[in-house]
Image (tube, coloured by chain):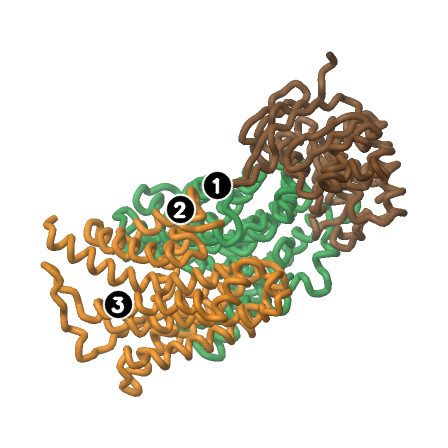
């Protein structure tokens, strides 16, 4: 195993990891504020990917230019889903939310299966085949863009949460819902906004992901477990954890695939996931399990 | 010296920087009814959690009926005869009163029909006979407290830890509950109760311990403890004892 | 208890009568598949409905049973009936293997659901990669009709087999409703701390329920193999079985005796109706299941059995 291959593998892992981080960030925000595990997160990503795909194939919109369309669209979808369906389904019990997000995931995935069959689709852009040289490694340009794009989006998200009034409201609700309510914060609205932002992250992630990746109805399922692994590893509700966890998992997956082949490499991730769930459910940076 | 049924030796637990219980030692004699009082946040319920096994102490020992049960799981303690109620009642909401109590009678009775029958007898002891088929979620606060009590009783305990069994009850309900507790103690069960309702403490308790900010600040007969200036200060604030003296 | 058992006997007799009366292959197939779905839902209900532990990866045990039976019969020439027993034991063992650490470390709610999902995925990937499972190609059971081989010419034989397992699952459920173990299991579900305070060991109770639930799923897996004579990693450990099991139980009514049977029957009927209307489309079934799940959770969280308060009247009253 020579250094060049390892180096390339790590870099590739980092670029994938950055996108994973973006996906996980949305999930951890949703958990941190609503205290629900959004089982529909992967399916929502899949929907976003098909959205980007559709925009490109039907209207010729470049995926990166689709950002201003996808992000608000996914935000709206998230807001509507939370306010209209998920909020109503809880009836005060967490397990109902678990089930309803699972139900949504199943519906979305299989609607996609009905509509698109299980074909895997990719898009072609002018730069799909361009590579960038970093040291001894050649990394595909879309992946490099994805890396920086994801990081920038994470930074924007962090800025929103720490510096805006909305962000303050979100943090208040996350910390102490009743108190926030008593202070006049519309908790239902904040919940829906948070869920919307969580899905908006997926809109961005999809724009960065599709040029270097692919879409099929099952792609969400693959991402969902990875996203959960990251969120649990990094700590539920921790942004730093999601970011670092995403990068770490990206690298682990890449190296795992290198040494064990793609299928078995995936097992490495699940093994980490199960281990963290059992032994350190609060994660590396999390405050509470 | 006769053997205490429950003996705590220097029990402490801290949560992060907060020392919830500090160096508490006490000896509870069998067949007595003791009370644990103190201002809110003093660590009383935490102490119960430590005794019953819901929390592990950082230091110290808990000895029950001659056995060291420090940190032992609650279900094992229940089997040994140490039962507790919860300050915020914890019913099995979807199940009926009879079924709720039956879970506890099953501790000593493996057969279903017999366990249900014994549950009925225990319910009668606390005055719930008329509500056996009601789902626990439909009960009033007073009835839920009785259910909580019934469940703990059904485990045939030697020691019963009652956590604010009178809280949330109106004066009439308190007056009805006190004889129930008295009868339990009279039946031979050792009781340690956390209580804020002073009338009950004065009436029922033979020995009182006062906890403030996690520490035991006084113990003795109810009369002695309520006159103790340190206790008065713990409840009413610094200098209160002197002011009361002067007034 | 007597009431429950009487109900089960009547149910069994009704199914037997139906089987004897029906001659159409289509209807017999529908009956068989409904019983199969009921078995999945009943199995899930043991742990999910009565134990309150929601497994999202119950296919883990189904697939274990299916592959155990397949490998036993195909690779080692073991008799089909023995293979069925092996499947049940293997699935139960996996149940213990997953349940022990999960409950030892206090996993609950979403975390438990996640861990079951993770394990199912791990097994799926292992089945894909391992040699002895046939990898992605899966395993085929050679055709060899005889009772000794648990292969029947007509669907009636399979219906009988399914019925046997369903009756066993129903009887186990009834036992849960009238036994100390069941009372403790439901107590842990309703309020774990209160249960601990009255002497219940949550670890042992949950583990026991998991093993029982897994055993029935393993049987279902082995039976699936006998009927369809084929198994692959996707079918064995994929989401379809996991979803079918949990939606059937929830739609019908968790924690009840007849809920899973009702739910399975409804879902199957819905599936058939849509198949007749729209044809055999991939994913259609699951869209229905997912939608029904969402609708039920939104409007009828206690499931069908919650309507008309079946749950109340199922409560055995003063005699248990």
Question: In the rendered image of this protein, does residue B120 appear above or below residue A70?
Answer: above
Secondary structure, mark 1, is loop
Apparent side of residue B34 relative to residue C283 in the rendered image (left or right)? right
Q: Locate the N terminus of chain B and report the quarter of the image it occupies.
A: top right
Residue that extends furthest to the bottom in the rendered view of this protein: A59
**Mark 3 highlights which residue?**
A148
Chain under callout 3: A
Q: Where residue A211 sits: x, y (%)?
A: 24, 73
Query: Who is closer to the viewer here, C172 or C155?
Result: C172
Chain under callout 2: A
Question: Which is closer to the viewer, label 3 or label 1?
Answer: 3
Q: Quadrant of residue A209?
A: bottom left
Q: Where residue A239 sits: x, y (%)?
A: 40, 59
Residue that extends furthest to the front in the rendered view of this protein: B246
**Mark 1 highlights which residue?**
C105
Residue A248 shows up from this direction: yes
Report the chain shown in orange. A
In contact (CB < 8 Å): disc 3 and disc 2: no
Report the chain shown in green. C
In contact (CB < 8 Å): disc 3 and disc 1: no
Question: In the rendered image of this protein, does residue A49 appear above or below residue C175?
Answer: below
Query: Who is closer to the viewer here, B217 or C318?
Result: B217
């Amino acid at each position: 195993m020579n250094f060049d291959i390892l180096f390339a593998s790590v870099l590739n892992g980092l670029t994938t990891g950055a996108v994973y981080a973006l996906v996980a960030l949305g999930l951890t925000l949703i958990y941190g504020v609503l205290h629900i595990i959004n089982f529909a997160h992967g399916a929502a990503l899949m929907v976003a990917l098909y959205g980007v795909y559709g925009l490109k194939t039907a209207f010729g919109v470049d995926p990166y230019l689709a950002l201003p369309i996808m992000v608000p669209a996914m935000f709206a979808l998230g807001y509507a889903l939370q306010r209209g369906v998920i909020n109503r389904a809880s009836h005060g019990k967490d397990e109902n939310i678990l089930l309803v997000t699972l139900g949504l995931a199943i519906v979305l995935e299989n609607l996609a299966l009905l509509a698109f069959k299980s074909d895997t689709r990719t898009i072609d852009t002018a730069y799909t085949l361009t590579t960038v040289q970093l040291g001894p490694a050649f990394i595909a340009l879309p992946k490099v863009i994805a890396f920086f794009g994801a990081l920038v989006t994470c930074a924007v998200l962090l800025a929103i949460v720490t510096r805006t009034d909305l962000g303050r409201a979100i943090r208040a609700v996350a910390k102490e819902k009743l108190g926030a309510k008593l202070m006049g914060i519309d908790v239902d609205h904040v919940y829906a906004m948070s869920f919307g932002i969580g899905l908006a992250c997926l809109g961005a992630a999809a724009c960065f992901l599709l040029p270097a990746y692919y879409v099929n109805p099952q792609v969400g399922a693959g991402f969902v477990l990875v996203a959960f692994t990251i969120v649990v590893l990094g700590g539920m509700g921790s942004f730093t954890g999601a970011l670092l966890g995403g990068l770490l998992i990206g690298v682990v997956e890449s190296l795992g695939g290198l040494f064990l082949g793609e299928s078995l490499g995936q097992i490495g991730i699940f093994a980490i996931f199960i281990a963290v769930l059992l032994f350190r459910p609060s994660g590396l940076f999390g405050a509470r399990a | 010296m006769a053997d205490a049924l429950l003996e705590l030796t220097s029990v402490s637990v801290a949560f992060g920087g907060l020392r919830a219980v500090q160096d508490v030692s006490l000896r509870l004699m069998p067949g007595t009814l003791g009370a644990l009082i103190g201002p809110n946040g003093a660590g009383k319920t935490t102490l119960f959690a430590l005794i019953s096994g819901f929390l592990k102490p950082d230091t110290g020992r808990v000895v029950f009926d001659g056995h060291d049960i420090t940190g032992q799981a609650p279900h094992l303690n229940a089997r040994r005869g140490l039962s507790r109620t919860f300050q915020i009642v914890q019913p099995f909401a979807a199940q009926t009163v009879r079924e709720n109590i039956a879970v506890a009678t099953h501790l000593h009775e493996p057969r279903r029909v017999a366990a249900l029958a014994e549950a009925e007898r225990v319910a009668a002891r606390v005055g719930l006979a008329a509500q056996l088929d009601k789902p626990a979620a439909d009960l009033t606060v007073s009835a839920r407290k009785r259910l909580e009590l019934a469940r703990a009783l059904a485990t045939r305990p030697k020691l019963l830890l009652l956590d604010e069994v009178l809280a949330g009850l109106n004066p009439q309900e308190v007056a009805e509950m006190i004889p129930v507790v008295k009868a339990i103690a009279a039946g031979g069960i050792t009781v340690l109760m956390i209580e804020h309702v002073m009338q009950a403490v004065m009436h029922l308790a033979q020995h009182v311990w006062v906890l403030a900010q996690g520490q035991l600040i006084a113990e003795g007969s109810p009369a002695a403890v309520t006159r103790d200036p340190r206790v008065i200060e713990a409840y009413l604030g610094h200098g209160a004892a002197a002011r009361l003296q002067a007034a | 208890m007597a009431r429950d058992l009487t109900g089960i006997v009547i149910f069994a007799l009704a199914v037997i009568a139906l089987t004897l009366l029906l001659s159409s292959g289509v209807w017999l197939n529908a009956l068989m598949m409904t019983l199969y779905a009921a078995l999945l839902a009943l199995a899930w209900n043991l742990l999910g409905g009565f134990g309150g532990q929601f497994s999202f990866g119950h296919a883990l045990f189904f697939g274990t049973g299916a592959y155990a039976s397949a490998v036993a019969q195909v690779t080692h020439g073991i008799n089909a009936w023995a293979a069925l027993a092996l499947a049940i034991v293997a699935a139960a063992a996996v149940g213990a293997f997953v349940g022990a650490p999960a409950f030892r470390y206090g996993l609950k709610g979403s975390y438990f659901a996640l861990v079951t999902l993770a394990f199912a995925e791990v097994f799926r990937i292992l089945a894909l990669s391992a040699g002895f499972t046939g990898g992605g190609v899966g395993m085929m059971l050679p055709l060899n009709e005889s009772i000794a081989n648990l292969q029947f010419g007509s669907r009636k034989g399979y219906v009988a087999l399914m019925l046997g397992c369903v009756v066993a699952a129903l009887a186990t459920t009834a036992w849960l409703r009238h036994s100390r173990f069941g009372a403790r299991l439901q107590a842990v579900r309703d309020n774990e701390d209160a249960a601990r305070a009255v002497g219940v060991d949550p670890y042992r109770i949950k583990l026991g329920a998991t093993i029982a639930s897994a055993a029935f799923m393993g049987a279902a897996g082995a039976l699936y193999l006998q009927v369809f004579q084929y198994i692959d990693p996707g079918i064995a450990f994929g989401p379809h079985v996991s979803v079918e099991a949990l939606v059937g139980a929830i739609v019908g009514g968790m924690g009840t005796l007849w809920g899973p049977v009702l739910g399975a029957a409804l879902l199957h009927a819905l599936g058939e109706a849509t198949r007749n209307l729209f044809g055999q489309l991939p994913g259609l079934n699951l869209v229905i299941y997912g939608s029904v799940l969402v609708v039920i959770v939104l409007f009828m969280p206690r499931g069908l059995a919650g309507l008309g308060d079946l749950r109340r009247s199922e409560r055995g009253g003063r005699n248990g």
